[in-house]
Image (cartoon, rainbow, N blue to C red):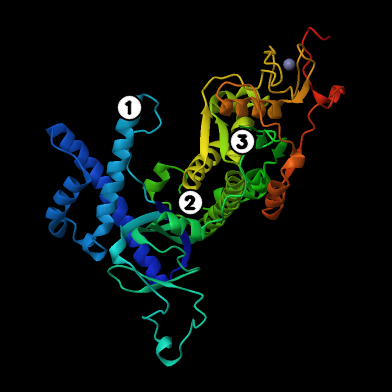
Amino acid sequence: MYIHHRIEIKPNQKQITYFRRSFGIARFTYNWGIDMWEQLTKEGKHRSAIELTKIFNGIKAEQYPFVLKVSKSVPEYAFRHLQKAYLNYFKSLKAGDGKYGKPTKKKKRDRFGSFSFKGDQWLLSWTNKTSKALESKPHNLDHKHQYLRLPKEHTYVKMMEPLRFTGKVVSVTILQHSDKFYAIFCVNITEEEYQRTHKSTVGDGTLGIDLGVHSLMALSNGLLVKNPKILEKMEKHIIHLQRKSERCVHPHSKRQHKKGVQKSKNYIKACARYSKLLRRSWSIRDDFDQKLTTCLVRHYSDIALETLNVEPMSKDNIGKNKHQGNKLNRDAAWNTLKTLIVNKAKRMGRKTTQVPAFTKTSSVCSLCGYEVEGLTVRNRILHCPNCGQSIERDYNAALNIEKYLGMGSSETSGSKPADCGALLSDFKKNRIVTTQVEPGRKYTRRSDKSFMPALLV
Ligand SMILES: [Zn+2]
């Protein structure tokens, strides 16, 4: 099994220059590959990453000598990524889902970039062999830091933590994300190595998950996971920095760029601060997602998820305007959560089931199966006129989703928040905030915004 291990690295100024050059060459070869791919298509010839590499290697020394300054596997991997992009595009053309578009040319970006090189060109060391200070006095005796040797340059870059997995390293990707640099190791590990390095599973049981806006997740055991809403919390700061950078001197349009208006130093500084903040919000959110999904997969062996249909969720159904709705969606990022759950469950040997699309989960009573008509998203409580049940809307949907695990039988495990003490303590450890719904509570107050069908009134 392949596992990706991302480790932060601290390059010096010389190494940053080397990285930026490699980013540029990876981008250049990718864009060159698109042109060549289209040309080969017109001529009706075979197209693949190997073919592109062959053609490129034939002409690079003559036409593009600057490419020789970096490792030869940088263009190789750029062509591989391009091939993957085209294959994805063809696949989604066939399926007609429009998931992947046609590969487009990459643009130069100031604080972003990546390039990959082959697994046999790297070297890990506990000492920085290029450091002159090392000769006189040994450092890093407690083995806190490892150093990664870069191809071609053969300088050692400091890693913030050692590589945790033993196995064959297939490739290494260097990534710049705003103010930070990362090395991503793709390691091929065995099942035993996975068991050794990851937390073991704790419990078995079935779980239905309903993803939503009001609470990020409603679980069929009666817990509601609160959305941390990082973007909303940082919104003021983000807008402030965005406006600040707009006020600085810089080319506002292509015309001004042609006239020769340069980016001012203050503009570059403001942009750096802005992108740093966005990177930080992404990091916090990623940390939360990873912790939450690991907790869930560890405690449940059978997990049911709904097929996401973001369109109706995002627009008028939220009850606010479109702009507001999209903002809420970005803060929820359901697709990321879903992919994480599915992938982690696969690795841990757990099962996930997807409820078929367009199945009614929220408007159907979980107790008797009666379909309540005329329910909108504003109604948080569902009152069933058939059996008289009053139930929190998202919790009801989660129960309906869990039913799919029983293959048609309408029984749920019936677990309550009181039963999942281990899960709650795991949540508490990871600082994930949850609230509990009280099944069977009568919601009578008007402020509940509950929906009363005509039958009852
Ligand atoms: Zn009912």
Q: Amino acid at mark 3?
A: Thr
In the rendered image, residue 343, in percent from the top left (x then y), is placed at 48, 43
Q: Is residue 340 above or below residue 368?
A: below
**Residue farthest to the right, as pictured:** 445
Q: Is residue 9 above or below residue 140?
A: above
Q: Residue at x 39, y 86 (%)?
A: 132
Q: Residue at x 29, y 44 (%)?
A: 82
Residue ID for mark 2: 250
Viewer-nearest residue: 175 or 354: 354
For the residues labelled 3 and 1, say whether their Cβ atoms are less than 8 Å apart.
Answer: no
Q: Disc 2 or disc 3, which is closer to the eye?
A: 3
- Residue 154 seen in render: yes
Q: Dot 2: what SS?
A: loop
- Between the residue at mark 2 and the residue at mark 3, the CA separation in whole angstroms equals 56 Å
Q: Residue at x 38, y 62 (%)?
A: 167
Residue ID for mark 3: 206
For the residues labelled 1 and 2, say whether their Cβ atoms are less than 8 Å apart.
Answer: no
Q: Dot 1: what SS?
A: helix
- Between the residue at mark 3 and the residue at mark 1, the CA separation in whole angstroms equals 36 Å
Viewer-nearest residue: 247 or 376: 376
Tell me where residue 193 sits by quadrant.
bottom left
Q: Dot 3: what SS?
A: strand
Label annotation for residue 260: none
- For the residue carrying disc 3, how many other residues have a C-alpha within 10 Å: few (<14), some (14-19), or many (20+)? many
Which badge, 1 or 2, is on the more N-terminal residue?
A: 1
Q: Amino acid at mark 2?
A: His
Residue ID for mark 1: 93
- Residue 110 seen in render: no
In the rendered image, residue 363, in percent from the top left (x then y), is placed at 67, 18
The picture quadrant for ligand 1 comes to top right
